Amino acid sequence: MRILLVEDDALLGDGLKAGLSQAGFAVDWVCDAMSADAALAAEPFAAVVLDWNLPRGDGLSLLKRLRERRLSTPVLMLTARDALEDRITGLDAGADDYLVKPIALGELAARLRALLRRAAGRSDPLYQHGELVLNPATHTVTLAGQPLACAGREFDLLALLISQPGRPMSREQIEAALYGWGEELESNAVEVHVHHLRKKLGSDWIKTLRGVGYMLNPAKAEAAP
C-alpha cells in the first residue's frame, strides 16, 4: 500500500523509506509540512508517517488541518517528542498512533499494517477470499492450503485486490496505490501482472470488467479453505 513519509532528517528518511519499501509498502517521501499538505491534497495515500518538528510548518498543525478537512487517512506520528503531554496532544489532535524515535523498522511496519486493518474495519491479520489466503506480514500466499510463489508487484497487486472484496479497481487506481513517485512504470504493467497472477491462480480468479477494472471473482469467495 502507498504510504506518505514526512520526515526532514535526510539520513533517517532515507533509511525509513528503504526499510518500509522492503516491508512491502510503496513509499513517497517529503521533507516539509507544506509539501506533505500538497501531496495529500493531490493524491491518495493509505497512511501517513508524520514527524512533528518540520520545516515550513509543523506536523501537529498539518494533522489538525487534515482532520478539519475530514481526511480520514490513518496518521502515525513518529517523533522525538517523548513527553506524556506531547503523546496525548498528538493523539487528541487526530493521530491514530504515536511512536517515539528511535524506532525499530519491524515495529513501524507492524503498526502501519494494524492501522490499515482498523481503517478497513478488520481485525484479522490475514486476508482470505475462499481458498486464497494472503498474509501481508510474512508476504506469503496459499491457495487451497498450498504455498503459492508470489512476490514483488504480483504480491502487491493481489494484496490490493483481496483487500477490496467486491470492489473493481481501475488501472489508474491500482497504479496510484502501488507505485510511488519516480518509479518507472510501463504502460501495460498492470495488465502484465494480472496475466501472471492468472497463470498462477487460474484464469477465472481475476475478473476483468470492461471499462471499469479488475476484481477477484466473487464466486471464489464462496469456497471455504
Image: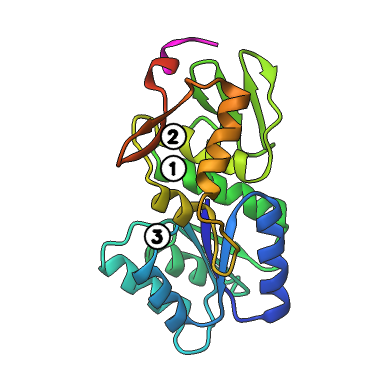
Query: Where is residue 72 shown, x and y percent of the image?
Result: 34, 57
Residue at point 52% right, 88% down? 55
Query: Where is residue 3 shown, x and y percent of the image?
Result: 52, 59
Q: Amino acid at mark 1?
A: Arg
Location of residue 186 by image quarter: bottom right
Q: Which residues are magenta?
A: 221-225
Q: Residue furthest left?
A: 69
Q: Which residue is mark 1?
A: 118
Query: Where is residue 205 shown, x and y percent of the image?
Result: 49, 23
Question: How was the colour assigned to the protein in this rendering?
Answer: rainbow
- Badge 3: how crowded within 10 Å, few (<14), some, or many (20+)? some
Front position in the image: 77 or 162: 162
Q: Earlier in the sequence, mark 3 or mark 1?
A: 3
Residue 16, compared with residue 136, is above or below; it is: below
Q: Whole-Å distance between the Cαs marked 2 and 3? A: 20 Å
| SS state under label 1 | helix
Q: Mark 2, mark 3: which one is toward the viewer? A: 3
Asked if residue 102 lies left or right of residue 88, the reply is right
Q: Which residue is mark 2?
A: 122
Q: Is residue 142 visible?
A: yes
Residue at point 73% right, 77% down? 11
Q: Identify the mark at residue 214; answer none if there is no mark.
A: none
Q: Amino acid at mark 3?
A: Pro
Residue at point 44% right, 59% down? 45
- Badge 1: how crowded within 10 Å, few (<14), some, or many (20+)? some
